[in-house]
Every structure is written in C-alpha cells, then in structure tokens.
Image (tube, rainbow, N blue to C red):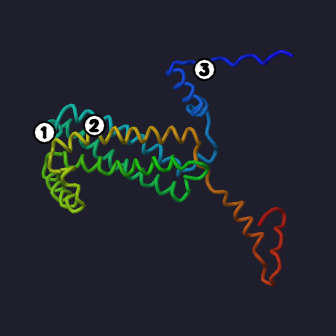
C-alpha cells in the first residue's frame, strides 16, 4: 500500500502569504467583474458611483488649491474658478452621499453578510462632516472666521475644544488637506472592496412577498382568497 504524497511546504515568504490571502479574500473575477446583475440598472444604484466621482473632483481640485495657497484662490480668476469647483464638488458629494445612504438604509444594505459594507459607508459619512468643517474654516475670509467662532462654542460645550481648535488655521489646514482626506479615501476604498467581495445588495423581492400576503388573506366570507385567473392577480 503506497503512502500519500507529502504536502508541499508552505512558502515562508510573507509576500506570498499576503498575496494568497488577498486572492482568497477577493478573487480577480470579483475585484474586476465583467458584468453586474440586471437590478443594478436601477437609478438608486447611481448615487454610490456619483459619490465616488464627486470625491475624485474634490481631491483633484483640492490638491491644486493646497499647492497654490490662499492668496491664489482669493485674488486670481483661475484661483476663484478652482475654489468654486472644489466647493460645488463638496456640495454634490454630500447630496449624492446622503441619497445613497438613505437609499441603502431603506434597502437594508447590511443583508447577506454585508454589515461591514454598511458600517464603512456610514463611518465615511461621519468622517466627511469634520472634513468639510475644517475646509470651511480654512478659507481665510470672513465666512471662515464666523464659522470658526460659532463652531468653537459648540466644540467647547462638549469638551473637545482643547483638542480641536477651529480658530487655529494651521491645525485646521493640516486636518483638512492631510489627515481627514486620507481617512475618507481609505474608508471609501475599503467600502468599494467590500462591495466587490460581497456583491451589490439586491432589492427586496416585493412581488414574491405580495403574492404570499395575497395568498394568506381571507376573502369576505372568512375563507381563503380566490386563486388568480390566467396567472394574473
């Protein structure tokens, strides 16, 4: 009786182990699929992509503004142009992200083991709020001063004013152009990868639920509901 062949030794390289774990967690056919289910054609699925598109515009325009500085975006025409692009991209980002968030809430997007997908999306929204706030108080104009003084009272009332000083331009600028954007981008990347791994959440099967409720309803005499004629209800 021949013995079983020995198992191949597991590679000792950490890069090989990381690669194998990554491929096992997210196979290439899921990471870069060549098709999507038909229900993705619904308009409610558009707002997630619109959030990513507006975020790309925010990062691109914000990078230019950060390189040129406040004097450029206040006193030159092209600076005003990029400042407006950045501001309206932020407005669009929050609008489509809120619609996306509420749409997925009513669709119960955490179904089917997608809890982490939902959590990363919700946390992204929470991190985006202080990112926008630090941007508003970094404008270096009267609006920024007014917003900063009003926000400082609110932050002091909850005991975090000593750690998050909105009247300190250097601190707010650092938060806005480096720390918080990196957090948002990392969360969005994790969110997209989780969506690729678990798939897009399907809509509720409303026709099946309606058919089940219709079959369970009694008629006016207390008996079972009559069957549909010709396959139509």
Distance Cα–Cα, label 2 vs label 1? 24 Å
Q: CA distance from mark 2 to mark 3?
A: 40 Å
Mark 1 surroundings: few (<14), some (14-19) or many (≥20) residues within 10 A: few
Q: Residue at x 29, y 50 (%)?
A: 130
Vertical placement of residue 226 versus 61, above or below? below
Find residue 178 and name its label. Answer: 2
The answer to which of marks 3 and 1 sits earlier in the sequence is 3
Look at discs 2 and 1 and give the one toward the viewer.
2
2 and 3 marks in contact (CB < 8 Å): no
- Secondary element at image label 1: helix
Residue in the image at 22% along x and 58% along y: 159
| C-alpha separation, residue under disc 3 versus residue under disc 1 | 62 Å
**In the image, is 150 to the left or to the right of 195?**
left
Rendered position, 128 above or below 149 = above
* Residue 213, horizontal then vertical, whole percent: 72, 69
Residue 46, compared with residue 73, is above or below; it is below
Query: Where is residue 169 drawn, in percent x and y?
Result: 15, 44
> Which residue is label 3 attached to?
10
| Secondary structure category for the residue under label 2 | helix
Q: Which mark is residue 75?
A: 1
Q: Pick out the residue farthest to the right.
A: 1
Question: Observer-nearest residue: 87 or 216?
Answer: 216
């Amino acid at each position: 009786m021949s013995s079983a062949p020995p198992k191949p030794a597991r590679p000792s390289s950490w890069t090989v182990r990381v690669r194998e774990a990554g491929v096992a967690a997210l196979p290439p056919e899921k990471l870069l699929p060549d098709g999507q289910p038909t229900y993705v054609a619904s308009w409610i699925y558009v707002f997630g992509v619109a959030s990513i598109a507006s975020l790309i515009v925010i990062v691109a325009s914000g990078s230019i503004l950060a390189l040129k500085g406040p004097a450029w975006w206040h006193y030159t025409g092209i600076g005003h142009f990029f400042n407006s692009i950045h501001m309206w991209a932020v407005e669009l980002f929050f609008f489509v992200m809120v619609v996306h968030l509420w749409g997925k809430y009513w669709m119960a997007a955490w179904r089917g083991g997608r809890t982490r997908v939902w959590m990363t999306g919700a946390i992204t929204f929470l991190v985006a709020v202080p990112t926008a706030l630090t941007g508003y108080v970094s404008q270096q104009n009267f609006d920024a001063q007014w917003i900063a003084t009003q926000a400082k009272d609110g932050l002091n009332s909850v005991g975090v004013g000593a750690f998050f000083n909105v009247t300190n331009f250097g601190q707010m600028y650092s938060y806005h152009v480096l720390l918080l954007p990196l957090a948002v981008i990392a969360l969005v990347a994790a969110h997209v990868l989780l969506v690729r791994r678990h798939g897009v959440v399907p809509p509720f099967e409303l026709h099946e639920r309606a058919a089940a409720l219709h079959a369970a309803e009694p008629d006016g005499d207390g008996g079972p509901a009559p069957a549909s004629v010709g396959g139509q209800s």
